[in-house]
Image (cartoon, rainbow, N blue to C red):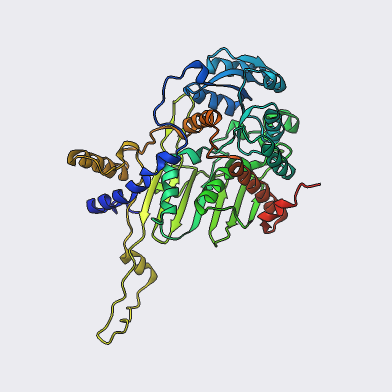
Amino acid sequence: MSQDQHVSRRDFVKAAGAVTAVAAAIPAVHGAPAVQKVRAANDQVQYGVIGTGSRGRYLLKHLKGIDNGRCVALCDIDASALKQGVDIIGTNPKQFKDYRELLAARDVEAVFVLLPLFVHYPVTRDALMAGKHVFCEKCLVFKPEEVHALRALHLEHPRQTLQTGLQRRYSTFYQTVKQMVDKGILGDVHHMHAQWHRNMINKPSTLWTMKPGGEKSIANWRIYRSMSGGIAAELTSHQADIADWMFGSAPEFVMGLGSLDTLKDGRDVWDNVQLIYKYPKGQKLTYSSISTNQFLPFFNGNRAEMGEIIMGTEGTIEITVGGDDPDKKVFQPPIAWWYREPPKAAAEITKAGEKKKEALVAGATMVTTGGANGPIPIMTGDMTFTGKESFLDKEVKFARRWLTSRGVILQEEQRNPVDTELESFFDCCRTGKPPIANLEVGMADSVSVILSNLAMDEGRKVYFNEIDKMGRR
């Protein structure tokens, strides 16, 4: 898109009014208080963390800033990782090598399961049976039989919170887009495209690089099928969950192609996947994840790797979540751009009451004359229009939005969705409210991963109702 195709001031004001009503609904579904308070010690949820590897340490750096929970225990089989976790959280927690000893600690009310995927279910199962609230990173389960087992177990423990780590559900950007979809602002939403492209040749990730020991080393868990769901579990799962959320249902079937073309170092998970999901009302998600190029053809090429496009008859959203280095050395802001479709053309009527025959023009000319609308940033923190601004405040917000649309100012969320999901978990533990990313959200996400891999492995269309009979004795 040409950089000089920007919306007019009148368009901006009109669009702001449309989003204002949507944004006003967000606090009720956001999942956590907007303003933090200093908590009394007895009001804090006493929690333990099982797994202080890369993801565990990342969340610990966020958890230390969440005041409605207090870390009292950490567990990891790796002494070095455990010490790093202790140093990060700074609350002098008890240290365990065996997670079952942590679960036996009476002062631990809730646990975070931040382990390799293949042990998510057994540890979550043991935690629920020990009477603990559980936050388990996605995916909740690894095998079909675990889908049925965890559902049954959760029914036996209805008072315990079970939340899964799908932080996009806690983003005000994504929540605003969901409201726009539900309120019809984008028209009839039938198509979505998502990608997560990485260049593992020029920019290897230590998490996905083969380490000594091969399949015998737990450090390689992401790249072996015995321990991992591969790309579908680690990447696709986030974005397939967004499609379920936006479309309002699980898919009807999935088909796809997976292959191991480049990273031939002994791993047995695919290094690139392409998937198509068909939903009951005809909606479709197309998905791509490759490992040899990180280009993202959204946002005028200003971001790399991951993002989603949500397309409706009245408009399109380009969106991606923000990213941060735990040490705050690098920050990538979230982006949410709204493009409106050209208005419906009114049929020209002749005096005889018949439609006037349209002139025949080339397809490219038709697209050009239709007029491309520039991006409108839909949620930019303190730039949201409430309708209560003074004239000066309104002009300032308009100016900031205008500069944002031109890339001069970065969009920003008032809170990192990771912080919001963590605070929300503790809030649910105390109040009994169901989490936004609850059991069924997490289970649908896990099923999507299981069936996506099956579709690629068997080269066929896999229906989602097949899970009902899979893994049952």
**In this image, 382 relative to 299: left or right?**
left
**In this image, 324 relative to 354: left or right?**
right
Q: Is 317 located above or below residue 343 in the figure?
A: above
Seen as rendered, the residue at the extreme left is 391
**In this image, 324 relative to 341: left or right?**
right
Residue ID at (65%, 30%): 115
Q: Is 250 located above or below residue 90 in the figure?
A: below
Q: Position of residue 59 (x, y in %)?
A: 54, 27
Q: Position of residue 7 (x, y in %)?
A: 27, 53
Relative to the observer, which residue lies in front, 166 or 286? 166
Determine if residue 291 is in view. Answer: no
Relative to the observer, which residue lies in front, 178 or 462? 178
Residue ID at (56%, 19%): 71
Quadrant position of residue 340: bottom left
Residue ID at (62%, 32%): 160
Seen as rendered, the residue at the extreme top is 92
User: Which quarter shows the N terminus?
Assistant: bottom left
Determine if residue 314 is in view. Answer: yes
Query: Count of labels shown?
Result: 0
Q: Is 372 located above or below residue 9 in the figure?
A: below
Relative to the observer, which residue lies in front, 267 or 366? 366
Relative to the observer, which residue lies in front, 29 or 257? 29
Q: Position of residue 263 (x, y in %)?
A: 65, 41
Seen as rendered, the residue at the extreme right is 473
Q: Position of residue 419 (x, y in %)?
A: 47, 30
